[in-house]
Image (spheres, rainbow, N blue to C red):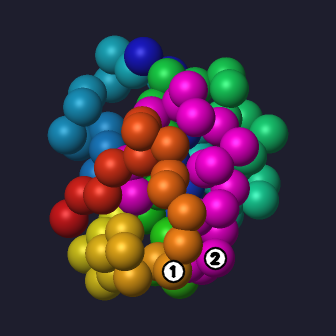
Amino acid sequence: MKILVIGMDTSLQECRAKFGDQHHYALVADQQNGEKLFAEHDVIFDFNIAAFPKQVETYRNHPNVPALLNTTLASLKQLGTDEKLPALVFGFC
């Protein structure tokens, strides 16, 4: 599986520890740098969404890529979107 991690190196390390080294990982610092890679990956883990809540709109353009957003500090509703997000956007803590 190809996993895109949006966050810091510690976020990447956490994903590797949980999912193992058999997967292929890519790390980017923010959604803007990651968006061009969305279609190339099977799943996205976004650890930075609370710091950049308006970037939740980025996922609207990519309804076929599962995206898991770190909602420890902000729920999906608190991220401030008035419109529905694609069905493949989930929150995790």
**Quadrant housing the N terminus:** top left
Q: Determine the residue located farthest toward the front in the rendered image.
A: 83
Say which residue appears at 54% left-offset and 72% top-offset: 81
The answer to whether the residue labelled 1 contacts the one labelled 2, judged by CB atoms less than 8 Å apart, is yes
Quarter of image, res 30: bottom right
Q: Which residue is mark 2?
A: 54
Is residue 66 among what the camera can see?
yes
Inspect the magenta stretch and tell me whether residue 93 lies in it: no
State the image coordinates of residue 15 (x, y, percent, origin top left): 32, 44
State the image coordinates of residue 74 (x, y, percent, origin top left): 34, 81
Q: Secondary structure at mark 2?
A: helix
Inspect the magenta stretch and tell me whether residue 56 lies in it: yes
Disc 1 crowd rating (10 Å Cα; few below 14, some 14-19, many 20+) is few
Q: Which residue is mark 1?
A: 80
State the image coordinates of residue 12 (x, y, percent, origin top left): 43, 50
Say which residue appears at 24% left-offset and 31% top-offset: 19
Q: CA distance from mark 1 to mark 2?
A: 7 Å
Say which residue appears at 40% left-offset and 58% top-offset: 69
Is residue 8 among what the camera can see?
no
State the image coordinates of residue 93 (x, y, percent, origin top left): 20, 65
* Amino acid on which the number 1 mark rests in the picture: Gly
Q: Secondary structure at mark 1?
A: loop
Residue 93 image label: none
Magenta stretch: give its range: 52-69
Q: Which circle, 1 or 2, is nearer the viewer?
A: 1
Closer to us: 45 or 89: 89
Q: Is residue 92 left or right of residue 39?
A: left
* Amino acid on which the number 2 mark rests in the picture: Lys
Say which residue appears at 55% left-offset and 63% top-offset: 83
Q: Is residue 38 left or right of residue 78?
A: right
